[in-house]
Structure formats: structure tokens, C-alpha cells
Amino acid sequence: MANNRRIVIVGGGFGGLFTALDLAGAGEVTLISNEDHFLFTPMLYEYLSGEVEEWHIAPNQKELLDESVNFIHGEVAGINLEAHTVSLKTRVAPLAYDVLVLGVGGVSNYAGVEGAEEYSIPFRKIADADRLRLRMVDALDSVPPDLPPQDTQRALTFAVVGAGASGVELATKMADLLRDAFKRRALRGEPRVLVIEMGDQVVPGMGDEIRELVEDALLKSHVEVHTLTRVVRVGEKTLTFEHDRRQTEIETAAVAWTGGVRVSPLIESLQVEKTTRGLIVVKPTLQLSAHENVFALGDIAHFSDASPTLAGTAQLALQQAGLLAKNIKALLDGDELQTKHFAELGEAVSLGTERAAVLAGGKVFGGALARQARFALYTSRLPTWHHRLRVGASWFFEGTTPRPLLPLGARR
Ligand SMILES: Cc1cc2nc3c(=O)[nH]c(=O)nc-3n(C[C@H](O)[C@H](O)[C@H](O)COP(=O)(O)OP(=O)(O)OC[C@H]3O[C@@H](n4cnc5c(N)ncnc54)[C@H](O)[C@@H]3O)c2cc1C
């Protein structure tokens, strides 16, 4: 194998990091990412609730990578496919590559909704979860215990935009945390958590059995579901939505945005073959059609031979990373590149702090057992054996109890 070939991987998420882990030693591998850590996004809800800690789901890249992989913490601002270089915001000289892997993922899609980008809180990163948690604590702290129930509820109204898996996972988690805080702080009445969804049902794209469990959990967590409802405007402390052509404006302590994803701006600026949604069209080998030394995977790539339910999922990016690493080795060795069909590995949806729903081996189950199964399943999907063992031991011996929303100043 040509060990001096420069393999540059852009993006340290599910696609990029797992490719780098598989490629260690296969050439001069450089991983560039604008965050210094990997993020296991499926458990960002548990990070919000304090069921898991930052080090569990967001380990530093350098802790995970083999010494042979060079990690650059920086943002790629441009790619020159003709000159075979990538340029970073923080470096003058561009970086040359022999093989390039694009795995920069997506960004929140605010779909042009007025005020959404400015006032709502996205839910994609550790910093977003920190911001949302702080907003919940601030709102709780602002309410005196003797405030009448209706005023308390008005001050503690939170909205989540989008009722896909992300929206329902977030809303149930927030509702459970807030209700727990009500008890601890002896507040009067109940918090209000709404989910706003344009479509006619929650978790579109998931099976009916799992949807039933999701609907039941939304009910148990007292989440108000508004389907066939469109968000029209987000203000600093308000949300306006439209249902049946009637607009309603409510006061909100925070609006969390899980309303959609679009490809990273870096990919938007790249002149290559794309779908109408802006995804890079890749060959079955994950190569770009006009550039055989450039590969793309994960949320930015359109790969045709995968179950439709896998679009935009970590499961797909993770599976593609294995194929991609093999194909880069084959390309460097002059061997034939392979392809693979990617199938659904199952679903695991967190539903509040006590329940989950899991689809595994064709069977759906819910409740507290599903919550445990989800932790076990996700331990096995974390990067590297070493990290899996550390995290698994921590969850097993130290537990995964949520961290309450205590007053600011108290230990939170
Ligand atoms: C809250 C949440 C929960 C989710 N839950 C699930 C789930 O339960 N199951 C599931 O299958 N999927 C889930 N997903 C989707 C899953 O996270 C994505 O499909 C997956 O991360 C895609 O992998 P990727 O490698 O394409 O991109 P990502 O994992 O997003 O990685 C992209 C990386 O590129 C970096 N980057 C971006 N732009 C640049 C740049 N210009 N220069 C350098 N670096 C850059 C980013 O910082 C990031 O590290 C969830 C997503 C979110 C946000």
C-alpha cells in the first residue's frame, strides 16, 4: 500500500471520524473538524437532562484517534477540486490531498421562517443543549412559588418546532425535567410544552407500532401536540403559529428548533453533481462521479442503495464509513472498489427521562426496559473499544439518573 498518500477527511462526525478510525496507518491521514470533539448526537437529549455527561457523548477527537492520524481543529472554508487542495479559515496555505473525504454533515434549516434563526435555539450541538438548559433554569428561577398557576404556566411555556424523532425526544425530555422541577420548587400548576408539526402525524417515516408508543409517551409527559400547524414567526419571547388559517401568538420562555436540516454551506458552494435537495450524488462506491479521488458520505451525500428510512441518519453515516475506508485502501492499492446495500439497524427513541421505544430485530417494545436497552445499544455504537468500556462502566456503576433543574447558584 502507498503509505505516503495524503488522505484528508473533512468533518469529524459519524462519517468522518469513523472513516479516520478505520484508515489509521493506511496513509498520511488528516482529519479536520471545526469542533474539537466528536458528538454522539442520539444522546444529546440525555445530556440535556443530565442522564449522561459531556465526556460520555462528546469525547475529544485526540483521545479517540490513533497517533498516526493528524487532527486539525479548524474550519474548512473552501475546496479546490481541480488543484486538489482544501483551505482553512485559520491557515494561509491550503492543504494538499491525494484523496479527499467529505463528511461535513448538515446545519439547521429554518426554512425562511421569520425570527427563527435569531430567536429559536437549535438542537444539534453540546452548546445548544447547554443554552436550552440554562434557559429552562432561568425561566424557573424567575417564577415565585406563590404565583397563580395560570401565570406560572405562561412564564414556563416552551415550544419545540418539528415532531420528527428529534422533536418528540426533546419535548418529552424537557416536559419531564420541568415537571420534576415544579415538584422540587413547589411551584403551582404545570409547565406547558408544545410540539408544533406541519404534517398530520408525529414521527413521520416511522412505523405505526413505534408511533403508538411515542404518542403514549407524549400524553404521559403532558406534551401538547399541534399537527397540521405551521410556525409563522418566532419572536424574542413569542411564537406565532397557524392552524386552519387561524394564527395564534403565545408567550414562550424558549423555542427549540428541530424543524429540518440542510446541507452545510461548504457543500452548497461546491460545483459538483447534486440532487434537488443539494445532496452530493455519489457512486455506489461513495466516489464523486467526476472525481474518483473524492468521496462523500453521511448527511451530505445521496447514496441510492440504502433503505429509505436511513436518509440523514447516523446509522447510515456509520455504515458508509466502513465501506469508504475499505474503498480508499483499494484505490491506493489499485484494487477494485466495492459497494454494499445498507439496511436499517433498528430504531431507539428516547421518550422522556423514564421511557424509550426500541425497534430491534423486527420487534417494538417500550417503557423502562427499552430505556435500558437503548443505553446498552448505544454503548456498542460509541467510537473505539476503549471509550465504550469507560462509558459502559460509568453507566453501569454510577447510573444514569437525570440531573434536576436546580436554581441557578445551586449545584446544577
Ligand atoms: C440531536 C440529534 C439527534 C440525532 N439522533 C439520531 C439518532 O437517534 N439516530 C440516527 O441514526 N441519527 C440521529 N441523528 C442524525 C445524525 O446525527 C446524523 O445523521 C449524522 O451525524 C450524520 O453524520 P455526518 O458524518 O454526515 O455528519 P455529522 O455527524 O454532523 O458530522 C459533521 C462534522 O463536520 C464538522 N464540520 C461541519 N462543517 C465543517 C467545516 N466547514 N470544516 C470542518 N468541519 C466541519 C462538524 O462540526 C461535525 O463534526 C441525530 C441528529 C441530531 C442533531
Image (spheres, rainbow, N blue to C red):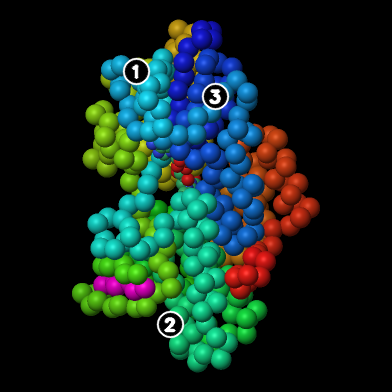
Q: Is residue 215 above or below residue 141?
A: above
Q: Is residue 47 above or below residue 306?
A: below
Seen from the viewer's position, the closer of residues 78 and 206 is: 78
Q: Secondary structure at mark 2?
A: helix
**Quarter of image, res 76:** top left
| Between discs 1 and 2, the one toward the N terminus | 1
Does 240 lie within the magenta span? yes
Q: Is residue 51 left or right of residue 71?
A: right
Is residue 159 at all visible to an observer of this figure? yes
Q: CA distance from mark 1 to mark 3?
A: 18 Å
Q: Residue at 55% of width from left, 86% of height from top?
A: 144
Is residue 202 at all visible to an observer of this figure? no
Residue highlighted by disc 1: 84
Q: CA distance from mark 1 to mark 2?
A: 56 Å
Looking at the rendered structure, the kind of residue marked 3 is Asn
**Quarter of image, res 60:** top right
Looking at the rendered structure, the kind of residue marked 1 is His
Residue highlighted by disc 2: 154
Q: Residue at 56% of width from left, 73% of height from top?
A: 178
| Residue 306 drawn at (x, y percent) | 41, 36
Residue highlighted by disc 3: 70
Looking at the rendered structure, the kind of residue marked 2 is Arg
| Residue 19 drawn at (x, y percent) | 52, 28
Please say if the residues under marks 1 and 3 sit with CB atoms less than 8 Å apart: no
Give, as a single range, the part of the protein colored magenta: 237-242
